[in-house]
Image (cartoon, helix red, strand yellow):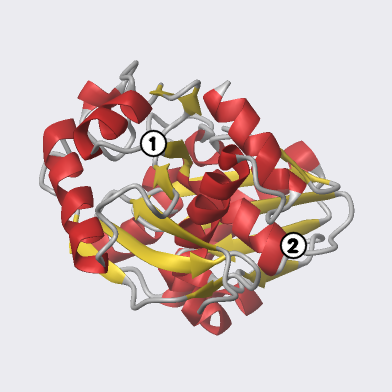
Amino acid sequence: MSNAITAVGVDIGGTGIKGALVDLKTGVLLSDRVKVRTPAGAEPDDVLAAVRQVLDTLGVSDAEVPLGVAFPAIVKHGRTLSAANVAHTWIGFEAEKFFEDGLGREIHFANDADVAGVAELRFGAARDAAGLTILTTLGTGIGSAMIHDGVLIPNSELGHLQRAGETTDAEAYAAYSAMERENLDWPQWAARLQWYYSHVEFLFSPDLFIVGGGVSKHADQFLPLLDLKTPIVPAVHRNNAGIIGAAALALATAGTDAVGGAADSLAEATTG
């Protein structure tokens, strides 16, 4: 462990908050993954307490190890500008400063899908991919990360594309949570994903789709059912990508050269 370049990544989701120590040379977790439930309502004070619990369990409550935090919202200059699966209190909220004050340490903060994209670019399925790669995370909602020739375009929010003639957006219709909520089988859910990925494919003509989130471990159950022109593959780091990418963001913002340019560009775009 002495040769590791280490940071902590915390990934805040609509249903769970998870974190771990990460080796940024390899993208490997150096600790067990700690997970707690996202508090009901996901108000800022309650989420802060849950993050503190994760850090305490990991034994990294002080500022010795850099910390990156991934959050399910548009993030610009440390502010959260949306709140699809958390309390509306987060809209326009100075979230980065809130966590820094509450934890008594510097925090590096970004959109959860974007940091997952950073992890897959540096250590996973997007490594060395040319052209436009679109990563989507299928969970409580649908997060997205757009990467063009190694440069991340932050806050794409493709889970909120609207369906023609419908009042609900794409993630309400096609996220993994919709499958669970409506008791869909794999073919029924895949039919919804077919609409979603075909629509994104039409809009952006990507060179590669990557599917992340916990359900990606069951990729063999639904990806073969999709008919797309674009190659589509599961994320290498699955549900750990947000943790790994958040840790990479912490080191990029801290000024180390141990992480790739995508993490640096994301740090600049989100913290200003």
Q: Quadrant of residue 167?
A: top left
Label 2: which residue?
Answer: 126
Picture disc at residue 18: none
How many marks do you count on the picture? 2
N-term mark: 1 or 2: 1
Judged left or right of residue 122, residue 225 is left
Q: Residues within 10 Å of mark 2 (few under 14, many from 20)?
A: many
Q: Residue furthest bottom?
A: 220
Give the residue displayed 24% in from the left and 28% down from the top.
Answer: 101
Judged left or right of residue 54, residue 174 is right
Label 1: which residue?
Answer: 106
Amino acid beneath label 2: Ala
Amino acid beneath label 1: Glu
Give how far apart the Cα atoms at labels 1 and 2 are. Answer: 29 Å
Q: Secondary structure at mark 2?
A: loop
Instruction: Check the image and report above or below for 215 versus 250.
Output: below
Q: Quadrant of residue 53?
A: bottom left
Which quarter of the rendering shows the C terminus?
top right
Give the residue displayed 78% in from the left and 64% down from the top.
Answer: 127
Query: Residue 229 appears at what percent x and percent y?
Result: 82, 61
Query: Residue 222 appears at what percent x and percent y?
Result: 54, 75
Q: Residue furthest right?
A: 130
Instruction: Check the image and report above or below for 79 versus 53.
Output: above
Q: Secondary structure at mark 1?
A: loop
Give the residue displayed 37% in from the left and 66% down from the top.
Answer: 20
Q: Residues within 10 Å of mark 1 (few under 14, many from 20)?
A: some
Q: Is residue 55 visible?
A: yes
Give the residue displayed 28% in from the left and 50% down from the top.
Answer: 62
Q: Is residue 188 visible?
A: no
**Disc 1 to disc 2: CB gap under 8 Å:** no
Q: Nearer the viewer, mark 1 or mark 2?
A: 1
